[in-house]
Image (spheres, rainbow, N blue to C red):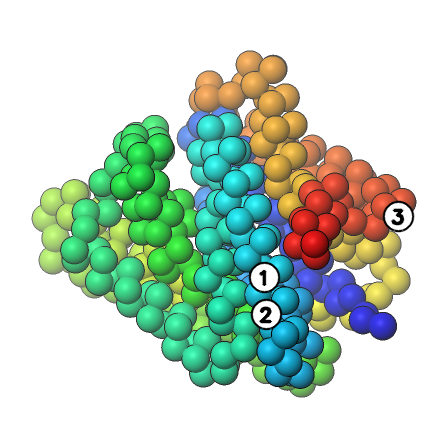
């Protein structure tokens, strides 16, 4: 019988919480208020969603582990079909969801799954190679296509999303979570899912390596911006340098992928460390239950969470960051309580059960 590694669920809960705080900040247009809070929330931007995607890669790896190890062609085909079904369902739900939440990640997720289905049996070296190619391909595309095409960045609106060219461009190149280079997170997650993180020495080695890469990448990015900016005379050029050399999620330059990916690996390793060290801790259990309902909660934070904010007249009205943090915190608290109650009764979340049922047909 398979033993569930609750550390992954624990990490998934924090990925959801981070996305809730960032997204509530965006929809409440929280550009004023306590500076410390605004800085803290801004630090999570692009990191929580990256963690979410790396964990998706881990899930794909665990789901297809038996097929990969047995090298049974029929089982491999079955698992690929399962991933393809999940991917198509995610694309459909995500596109239906996009008019409500333009920054949706689900339809991107769907394309990640479609492509990942063909990488479940490749070697670790090829996974890392594909990750590097994905990052370098994005840089190449920057030289060929204007990254800002289709965008009104003042309102974070993609003007021609519902055209074929606009949707293709948005999904694969310059959307919120474009396939190129975000596939790198999926490939890294698949690799991580193959590692025996229950082995203490290996887990701590990976955590130390990923933590070091994260810190060094962030420092190198900041240093390069400082050095290059000394030779600039116009503020517009300075903004361009920050975009090209910084570690923000848009545009997703290689240093962003490296920083966010290594941080995600570190958080996952630490989550497994905490849950293994304190296996009976009640809060750990409740957070793990929350992570098990991550898909359901992701949809709920828009439909229910933002729906309530709109009903209260708070949406898009330049609320201070304190309002965004309090709103997000309350949603996360309710999510923890609800998830614990639900998992103790039904084991799987509503959407999680739907996806499992469809993919296994």
Which of 82/240 is in front? Answer: 82
Q: In this view, does 32 lie to the left or right of 323?
A: left
Q: Nearer the observer, disc 3 or disc 1?
A: 1
The answer to which image quadrant residue 141 occupies is bottom left
Q: Residue beneath label 2, please? A: 77
Secondary structure of the residue carrying tag 1 is helix
Pointer 1: residues within 10 angstroms few (<14), some, or many (20+)?
some
Q: Residues at badges 1 and 2 in contact (C-beta under 8 Å)? A: yes
Q: Is residue 260 above or below residue 333?
A: below
Which residue: 58% across, 32% down? Answer: 302
Q: Is residue 13 left or right of residue 324?
A: right
Which residue: 64% across, 80% down? Answer: 72
Percent from the top left, x then y, of residue 4?
78, 66
Q: Residue beneath label 1, please? A: 81
Secondary structure of the residue carrying tag 3 is helix
> How far apart, in angstroms, are the residues tagged by discs 3 and 1?
31 Å
First of labels 2, 3 by sequence position: 2
- Residue 201 appears in the rendering: yes
Percent from the top left, x then y, of residue 96?
51, 33
The answer to which image quadrant residue 83 occupies is bottom right
> How far apart, in angstroms, are the residues tagged by discs 2 and 3?
34 Å
- Residue 49 appears in the rendering: no
First of labels 3, 1 by sequence position: 1
Q: Residue beneath label 3, please? A: 344
Numbered circle sitting on residue 320:
none
Q: In this view, does 201 lie above or below 215?
A: below
């Amino acid at each position: 019988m398979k033993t569930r590694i609750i550390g992954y669920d624990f990490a998934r809960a924090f990925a959801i919480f981070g996305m809730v705080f960032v997204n509530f900040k965006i929809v409440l247009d929280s550009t004023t208020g306590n500076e410390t809070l605004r800085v803290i929330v801004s630090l999570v931007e692009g990191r929580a969603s990256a963690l979410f995607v790396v964990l998706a890669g881990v899930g794909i790896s665990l789901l297809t582990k038996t097929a990969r190890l047995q090298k049974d062609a029929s089982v491999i085909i079955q698992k690929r079909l399962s991933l393809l079904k999940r991917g198509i369902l995610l694309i459909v739900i995500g596109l239906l969801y996009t008019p409500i939440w333009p920054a949706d990640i689900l339809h991107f997720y769907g394309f990640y799954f479609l492509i990942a289905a063909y990488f479940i049996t490749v070697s670790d070296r090829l996974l890392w190679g594909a990750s590097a190619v994905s990052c370098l391909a994005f840089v190449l595309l920057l030289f060929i296509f204007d990254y800002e095409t289709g965008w009104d960045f003042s309102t974070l609106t993609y003007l021609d999303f519902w055209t074929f060219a606009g949707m293709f461009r948005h999904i694969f190149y310059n959307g919120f979570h474009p396939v190129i280079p975000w596939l790198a997170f999926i490939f890294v997650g698949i690799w991580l899912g193959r590692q025996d993180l229950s082995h203490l020495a290996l887990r701590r080695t990976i955590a130390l390596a990923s933590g070091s890469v994260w810190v060094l990448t962030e420092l190198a990015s900041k240093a390069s911006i400082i050095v290059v900016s000394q030779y600039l005379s116009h503020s517009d050029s300075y903004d361009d340098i920050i975009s090209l050399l910084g570690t923000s999620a848009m545009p997703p330059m290689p240093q962003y992928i490296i920083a966010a990916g290594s941080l995600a690996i570190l958080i996952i390793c630490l989550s497994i460390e905490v849950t293994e060290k304190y296996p009976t801790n009640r809060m750990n259990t409740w957070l793990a239950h929350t992570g098990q309902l991550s898909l359901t909660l992701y949809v709920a934070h828009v439909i229910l969470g933002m729906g309530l904010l709109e009903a209260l007249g708070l949406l898009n009205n330049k609320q201070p960051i304190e309002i965004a943090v309090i709103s997000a915190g309350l949603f996360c608290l309710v999510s923890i309580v609800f998830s614990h109650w639900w998992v103790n009764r039904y084991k799987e979340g509503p959407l999680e059960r739907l996806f499992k049922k469809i993919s296994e047909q």
